[in-house]
Amino acid sequence: MLGPYRQLLTVRGLPSVLVWSLLGRLHLPGTPLATTFLVAGWTGSYVASGVVAGLYTVGVAVGGPLRGRSADQGDPSRLLIAISLAYATGLCALALAPSLVGPRWWPIAAAAALVTGLAQPPVTQIARAAWPRLTDDLAARRSVLTVEATLQELLWVVGPVLIAAVVAVGGGRAGTFTCAGLALAGSVGFALAMHRVGLRAPIEREHRAPGSVLRAHGMRAALTMSLCVIAPLTIMDMAVVAWARDYGTSAAAGALLAVWSIGSLLGGLYIGAKTAPPRLALRIALMALGFAALVPVLPPATDGSVWLIGVVLAVGGVAVAPALAATNVRIGELAPAGRTAEVFGWVMTAATLGSALTLPVAGWLLDHIGPGAAAGAAAVLAVVAALFAMAVPDPSRQISTG
């Protein structure tokens, strides 16, 4: 079972590039948390915090394809260092704003957040474009994408806990400064790891590739699938927090989300050791089944037991990382040569759009029906994703049968 992981360790430069790519993303889940505490403490308004966080997210979504295209066309290491400096500067400016101007000037912080989001370092995109260049073995590439998706689950647990601890001790300003430092150090470390393995030069594009990657065969269906895969995860986070607030305790939310992530981690580690091609639609359908299993154990069906909900989340979580990994594998295989980072920039945009469209609906369901309804909506979205997955072409199967 450990054979594929041993193989990954033998690929020159892959372990260091993988580790630094994860460290370069450690700040991502904690940044919205830090800025929310910063702006709320400065202005006394969660509306202002929401506007600042919203514009930051808009910047991230709009800039995703642009940052990816720049990485594909030029030196990704140089881009990472330059853009991480700009990003860290933007976060530091946000952190200092409460000391420089009064609360009524908070719209300046909103504008700064938009620009900062545009400059978010494209570590994830560049990393996913790097795996095919580090190894020609298709099974190894699939394994590393699964490992990446699995370990990223840990980031989404560790990152917020780390920043929350910093905020508890030093406030929102300290948390924002910490995110700036983590982003800069992680991005520079990743850039140096890329430099050491010779991944600074862009690869030649396919001459037949269309002007827009969105016109590539199967790409629009794949991006729609990705939107419908990621949005349910955001809905489930919201549903678990809502249940904990209304029926349990605040501490229960963190524990339940941690259990869910641990289930995902175990599922990802198991699947990552498999060399068979991933069955994309099946993996997403299994994730949908995990969401559906929560409907009868949450309100309004029942008030819910934290132990029962935890068991269902742990079992259902096993399918999450494998589904995400299979989605990334298929999208990476569909990307035209030399444009993978740009494609994953569009994936980030699709994911952000999906969350923006579905969270208000999830909020309405939570207010008027209950967390079970939100879990049901997440399951429906995942089923839609599985249907789109059936329409996404499989390049590896076409090659093997061609």
Image (cartoon, rainbow, N blue to C red):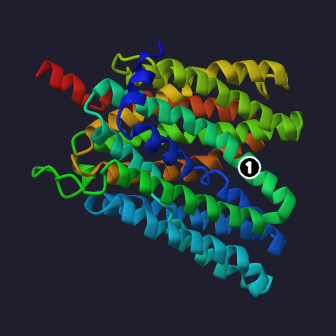
Coordinates of residue 394 in the picture (x, y in percent): 26, 28
Evaluate whether residue 385 shows in this view.
no
Reading the image, the residue beneath label 1 is 162
Location of residue 175 (image quadrant): bottom right
Location of residue 369 (image quadrant): top right
At 50% from the left and 58% from the top, the residue drawn is 187
Count the marks: 1
53 or 361: which is nearer to us?
A: 53
Coordinates of residue 130 in the picture (x, y in percent): 34, 45
Is 93 placed above or below 169 here?
Answer: below
Can you say which quadrant of the picture contains the C terminus? top left
Looking at the rendered structure, the kind of residue marked 1 is Leu
At 66% from the left and 68% from the top, the residue drawn is 51
Residue 214 located left or right of residue 84 = left
Question: Considering the numbered disc 1 on the image, is that residue within a helix, a strand or a loop?
Answer: helix
Is 374 placed above or below 191 here?
Answer: above
Mark 1 crowdedness (10 Å alpha carbons): few <14, some 14-19, many ≥20: some
Coordinates of residue 94 in the picture (x, y in percent): 67, 74
Is 215 placed above or below 80 here?
Answer: above
Q: Residue furthest bottom?
A: 101
Residue 380 located left or right of residue 66 = right
Location of residue 38 (image quadrant): bottom right
At 18% from the left and 25% from the top, the residue drawn is 398
Is 112 placed above or below 166 here?
Answer: below
Q: Residue furthest top?
A: 1
133 or 308: which is nearer to us?
A: 133
Evaluate whether residue 187 shows in this view.
yes
370 or 15: which is nearer to us?
A: 15
